[in-house]
Amino acid sequence: MSHVLAVLEQRDGALRKGSHEVVTGARRLADALSGNVDALILAAGAVRGADQLGRFGADSVITLTNSAFGMYAPEGYARAITERVKSSGYGAVVFAASATGKDLAPRVAARLGRPLAQDVTDLAVEDGAITVIRPVYAGKALLKLKIAGTPALLSLRPNVFTPVERPKAGTQESAVVAGPAGRVVVKEIKAAEAGTIDVAEAPIVVSGGRGLKEPANFKVLEELAAAFAGRAAVGASRAVVDAGWRPHADQVGQTGKTVSPTLYVAVGISGAIQHLAGMRTSKVIVAINKDKDAPIFKVADYGIVGDLFEVVPKLTEELRKLHG
Amino acid sequence: MKIAVCIKRVPDSETRVKIASDGKSLDEAGVKFILNPYDEFAVEEALRRKEQAAAGEVVVIALGPAAAQETIRTALAMGADRGILLQSDRIPTDGLEVAKALAAELKGAGFDLILFGKTAIDDYNHQVGPMVAELLDLPCVTTVVHLEIEGGKGVAEREIEGGVEVVEFPLPAVLTADKGLNEPRYPALKGIMAAKKRPLEVKPVSPGGGELEILALTPPPERKEGKIVGEGPAAVPELVRLLREEAKVL
């Protein structure tokens, strides 16, 4: 029997999107190891949404508080988690492969002297050992790894582990963590424009490439994204980011973000291998391109060959009808 | 300012991945290797910091096979002063073992900044920089897109979901570079010639094996053959129907 620690994130005192995915992944491991899931949150005080984690399979929810933990405190968080893992003994520690999780997990791993598998897309327990799948070579291959010894440390790629309801007690406890927050201090978060969703987190991504012809034409995609009733983000190919049309934060691909939305709409994107690397794990892919031989059609579930400046406004119109 | 940049030799992003006969590794035959693109941002940042200070040294360090000398020469051609190759034919899958080998070289060498790319585009381990920081007990900021340093203190910006985190840290520190930090320069011919004369020290190392065992390297599952719904705006209503009724995503 071996217990699993799920490390969750909060922002502004509310659990982050993705927390249910982390608990779901941790639950799968815990079931195979016949253990419990402890959900761990680091915060300045009580966290909204913590009482919901039992639904997704958390046996207990532990909130560790420190006045400096309202925002991410890399060293303070790493120390608190490491102490918890050392004192409680876990078979596995599961993080989100988010901006915070990918920064935090290596620190904890180094402090524990344990290996780390980042950005895991599947996991299992085989003959008592935890095995994971990770995309490598820009998604052109999948690496299957066995993690020897305990605890196994892993971070889960967002939007891959669909939350599953597995009601457990979800008992709540909280404790104050003493000590300094560390030398690295997050002073503030400059929020992106209100109402926008990050491409890495959005359930729907509408991406544009060189086919848009000029930066101002991205308005067509912004209108399309808006027609998805606030669930879509606008992404971009490397070509248009390098040309300065769109911010780097919106880039999908090998040197941008890896996304796995429910629906990915590629508009005026030819489908270079670097782009496919960033979006090939999307659940459904739609391509709109005037070149019927564009490689994007090879990975698309549905394609429309045509002038995007005619097709996209029509799609926007149809979606508006749908969403009233 | 004395700056170390840890770099990696990786297959070009255009590489068609062919899996070797052991079913666990890349078939390197015919593969072109490059300086990891994220490491270019780190090298560029180091050069700019040195140029601004008009003093200091930029040292590039790689763990890799003998052929990684070429990768180090690329960074020297950009303008780095000297290189160190920690030579090993085997690069551990376990990033912590890579971090230990680099930390052993960096320890006590008096660097003000130790820079990395945020991840390598082969294994995507995304961990060696912060692990080195922990092993050396140095402050660390990862995935930096903007950096200001003044008088022993730095302010970095890193992109997070839905915004940018503004992070303060003291020097010496470890930073990992993300795209957006700068525009890496192309080595000029003069730089390429000069790079040939710059010192490149080769030190054999034997990193530990670590505790990650590769069971298999496989191609990703093929996406099932899609369909062209139609041509032009006339195909849109059918697309919307398919997305609703067949794919059930609307």
Image (tube, helix red, strand yellow):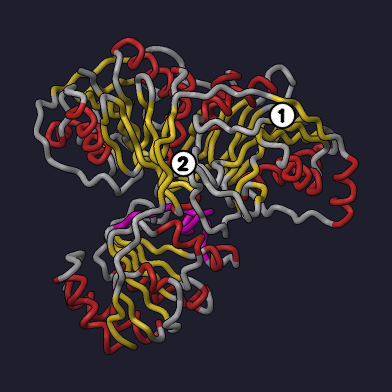
On-image quarter of the C terminus of chain B = bottom left
Residue B178 covered by magenta stretch: no
The amino acid type found where label 2 is placed reads: Lys
Q: Which residue is mark 2?
A: B24
**Which span of residues is magenta-colored?**
A246-261
The front one of A277 and A47 is A277
Q: Is residue A36 above or below residue B184?
A: above
Residue A251 covered by magenta stretch: yes
Q: Which residue is mark 1?
A: B151
The quadrant where residue A50 appears: top left
- Residue for point 33% across, 88% down: B231
| Disc 1: host chain | B
* Distance between mark 1 and mark 2 Cα atoms: 48 Å
Instruction: Determine whether the residue tagged by mark 1 lies in a helix, strand or loop.
Output: loop
User: Is residue B37 shown to the viewer in this render?
Assistant: yes
Tell me the chief SS of the magenta region.
Answer: loop
User: Is residue A14 shown to the viewer in this render?
Assistant: no
The amino acid type found where label 1 is placed reads: Gly
